[in-house]
Amino acid sequence: MSPFPRMAVRNVARNRRRSLITLSAVLLGVTAVVTTRGITDGFMRLMVDDVVKGRTGALQIHPTGYMASVEALPLEPSLPYDEALLARIEAVPGVAGVSGRLTFSGLVSNGVAQTTFVGRGLDPAREKRAVPRFGFEVRAGGRVLAPGDHAQALLGSELARSFRAVPTRQMTEGMVDRVTLAASSPKGQANSMDVAVEGLTESTLPFENKRVVAVPLKLAQELLGMDGRVTELVVAVKDLGDLEEVAAQLRVALGPAYEVHTWQELQPFVRDVIQRQRFILGVISAILFVIILTGIINTMLMSVFERVREIGTMLAVGVKRRQVLRLFLLEAMVLGVVGGVGGVALGAAIVSFLGAKGIPVENLGTSGTTFVRPELDLLFVGMAFAVAVMGAVLAAAWPAWKASQLNPVDALRSN
Amino acid sequence: MKAFVLAVVAVMAAGPALAGEPTPEELLKRYDEVMGPRTFEAESQMTAWREDGSSRTYELRMLKAGEDKSRIWFKSPASVKGQEILRVGDNLWIYLPNVKRATRMANRESFQGGDFNNADILRVNYSTDYAGKLLPSDVPETWALELKAKTQETAYDAIKLWVRKADGLPVKAQYFGTSGQMLRSAEFSDYTEFEKGYTRPAKIVMRNELVKSRRSELVLKSLKRGVEAPAQRFTQTDLGR
């Protein structure tokens, strides 16, 4: 067995101070990258959960032509909400559940004031299959829509506040627990219905808090004169990683009369926020990587200059230039591995600690607080480790090559 | 015997006339004639009261031709001066002078943020849109009518209408959604003879029954029937001219 690995380890251990500097550079760099990533992942998880598992679902199906004018919240074209269509969708592999919704616009009033709202007619019996966290954003004191509900509604928290509306159980003087929803049928016939406020919803998306009223699907259909119709179908997938694949299969299964969109397409705001975070994370990682590399190059150069006589001796006793090169690279690798392991361990410890404790953050545009729970992405941790080791080796390449090219005679003579 | 039968038939035939009770169809036809003459030009003023107590007054000119063509010019305040609305059949356009373009709008949208529905002003055609039924009236000297939409394309599912026994002119109306909830109510007053032999209410107060503090008032200053209204005035290209 080659003596070089052992020599490399010993060399690293011998130059304790120098090695410690390099080690701490690698260790701190890896720790920082792993921790930053953990926090970013936690934050993204929060947004994706909010959006995918709590609101839009992973995929949505609309009749072709709907999305082109989605801003106007058209009621037509609409979809039939029947078992046959649902069964066809559920038969597609990777689909975990599907539910229908009727999205509409109208005027909500409390008898004193009125404002426009975006109504979301939900099927309480099925909604949970399509968005598993259905109802997660309902504030304490309220309740989520349940099967059997009819003239009940959930109001966005900001909308409710401006209307002085609260759930019945929290009624106090000067507040209301009922509102009137007015909307028109696709043909323009006006209609209105009174609903009881059952809960207030609190979302990370400001729009949801200010404009959205959720009602049972049946009530929406009645209000709009659209019995048995929905404007969208929300689909949950078994694994978000297969999103595009499931979407493609759904497109094939449903044909050209339907459009299938992923949550990224439906919530470009969230997608953009996530992309921006990924970019910032990339920049931070790159900076840390440069710091790690500089540390290693510095140490290795120092060690080459300090050990010129030693190198000369090795070359003089017949150690080959290639072997000198390998020795220096091995030393760098030892530093990289030890620093990387330490960094990963420290980073993982910090992330797990924060993950268990949760970081309180202010909601965007609302007064509520949510907890970001940092999480470890094992693949990324592995990558950070590999990059640290490879970076260390690469950084050592030039000093190591320089060392191997020394002239033994000159090297022995130098001080 | 024969004479008796004849007498009975005569009495039966004359029955309604004797009781002085017109058919709902007749009353609706009368309403349409009075409130929605086929072709007319009018100057009017509309005031909208908001829930915060503020109000806004618009001056406008209306031109209506036939069953399905109408046009409105806004004259004041300055913020809407130059705006126009064109309706041809079910299509509705609003013209904004600052962008010099006509945008389509839905029939169901409110009329300039007020509580009149566009359909309340520009599309009065109760005898075609609704099936009427006479009800006992709770207002003296009036007939009470219940109107039920014949199709789903009307602005309201049902309307309750009170008209004067003397001349068939409207006194008040209530407008209902499919749920049976009252959405708006109207009161008609200031009966004015705009042309010889043509009297109609000059003032309509439309209340938003969902938000009681909101109401709009339409006052007609002048109205001329049977004016010249060439078809070219009801084209998109004519907007802004």
Image: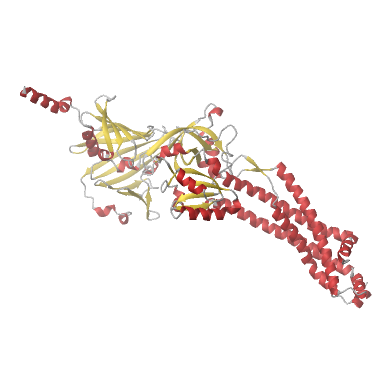
Dividing the picture into quarters, in which one does residue A294 lie? Answer: bottom right
Q: Which residue is depicted at the point 37% across and 55% down?
A: B101
State left or right for residue A122 relative to residue B121.
Answer: right
**The N terminus of chain B lies in which quarter of the figure?**
top left
- In this rendering, does residue B102 appear at all? yes
Picture coordinates of residue A146 (x, y %)? 53, 34
Instruction: Specify how the rendered protein is coloured.
Output: secondary structure
Residue A214 x/y as whole percent: 50, 39
Q: Residue at x 32, y 34 (%)?
A: B159
Residue B154 sits in which quadrant? top left
Query: Compared to B104, does B13 lie above or below?
Result: above
Between A3 and B120, the residue placed more toward the observer is: A3
Picture quadrant where residue A335 is located:
bottom right
Q: Please state which of residues A182 and A226 is positioned toward the viewer in this rendering.
A: A226
In the rendered image, which quarter contains the C terminus of chain B? bottom left
Q: Is residue A162 visible?
A: no
Q: Is residue A314 above or below residue A282?
A: below
Q: Position of residue B229 (x, y in %)?
A: 23, 50
In the picture, measured across the screen, residue A383 lies left or right of residue A49, that is: right
Q: Is residue B87 left or right of residue A336?
A: left
Which is more toward the observer, B121 or A86?
A: A86
